[in-house]
Image (spheres, rainbow, N blue to C red):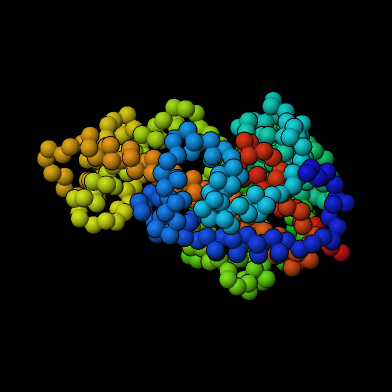
Amino acid sequence: MTLPPAASLHQPARSFYSHWQQVNDWLVRHQELWQPAPFMEPEPAWCERYPELAHWLGTLTVDACEAFEENLAAFAVEAARFVPNLADYSALVELPELSSPDSGARSALLELQAVDMPGRKRLQAGAFAAAVLPLEQPVLDWCCGKGHLARTLAARGAARVQGFEWNDELVQDGNRLARHYGDPVQLHHQDVMADSLNWPAGVHGVALHACGDLHRQLLKRGAAAGTPRLSFSPCCYHLTAQEQYQPLAKGSRNHAPALRPARNTLRLAVQETVTAPARVREQTARVTAWRLGFDALQRHLRAVDGYLPVPSHPPSLNNGDFEGFCRWAAGKKQLELPDNLDWQHWLARGEQRALQVQRHELLRHLFRRPLELWMVLDYAVFLEEQGYSVRLGRFCARELTPRNLLVDAVRVE
């Protein structure tokens, strides 16, 4: 359903804790299905526990995998024939729409004014602005960059907007833009993680795609200061100082059994991207097969059935061939390659593994949004514990950005 972005929505409501519990328990119950990384583990343990699921996945074509990637709810229904609780997926990830489909275009800056602002980012800022109207307090744009969101909110009625950004060059560029267009926006050079940060009184704190600990700092500092409203769309949850992630809310931390994902595991939550151009997809598929072919080759040569991490390769290798990639990778790992290798054999192995990885990643991707919600629902519970009434929903379509969740919290007097 669609919720009008009105302040009257912020009335006392049921806690988000029960929803968080459901997501947490579902993820814990199925950890063996989503924690192994298919690129590193050709035969994860779940294949033995759920042989019928493994067999069915093995029959899926590339086209079928791509179709299911676009409709994970349908995939969940099919997979639930083998693991019944997977049928709960759709109910767990259901959230309201917080703005109308065309709000991004209607509330965005005019293209002429959106200098240095990519079209997709312009529409994201417009949709975010539409979802948080009306703006009743001065605004603080957290991790503001050049102030694209700040200027968008100023154009939508914010009487005064200030921004915090650690990159001084972006601050200077943003202030020049604001002066040029007469926007009531002032950006400040500020490390938001610094203990010395002085939280402005009476502001509405906002953040569009602040990463990891940066958006978590917004929650903690804003709530501690008793700020009247916090609205943010989180991103890059894995960018945290914690080796093992701990929820923010007391209720979440005390729940048992509680998920305690490693920092690297959180990357799963942000793996989804908007579809790339065909040329980029083809290049990515080719390099993936190369990497998996080299992985099969190195396991054979070392007689060790274990993944060997290979660093990012120089772009120039993309225009080469499989043999060239393997020689580069072997050099990076001090691995001696014998003469007269059958390069076609190992490339074929890589291509076979690439299809297997695609099938196993499809299963893993079923847990991508629930893992993201596990974190974001915890943010909502944390803010409720701090005395806020909270809305949580989608502020734009997935096609505009998969990171389309918005937490909107108003302090209850």
Q: In the figure, residue 71 lies in which quadrant?
A: top right
The answer to whether residue 157 is visible is yes
The quadrant of the rendering that contains the N terminus is: top right
The quadrant of the rendering that contains the C terminus is: bottom right
Placement of 391 over or under 5, stated as above or below: below
Left or right of residue 215: residue 14: right
Please give the name of the residue rendered at 67% of the width and 42% of the height, measured from the top-left corner: 147
Placement of 357 over or under 200, stated as above or below: above
Residue extending furthest toward the left: 339
Residue 312, percent from left and from top:
36, 44
Residue 121, percent from left and from top:
63, 36
Residue 335, percent from left and from top:
19, 49
Residue in the foreground of this view, choosing between 339 and 410: 339
The answer to whether residue 215 is visible is no
Residue 67, percent from left and from top:
53, 35
Please give the name of the residue rendered at 74% of the width and 47% of the height, measured from the top-left corner: 96
Left or right of residue 194: residue 393: right
Q: How many marks?
A: 0
Q: In the figure, residue 23 lies in which quadrant?
A: bottom right
Residue in the foreground of this view, choosing between 103 and 215: 103
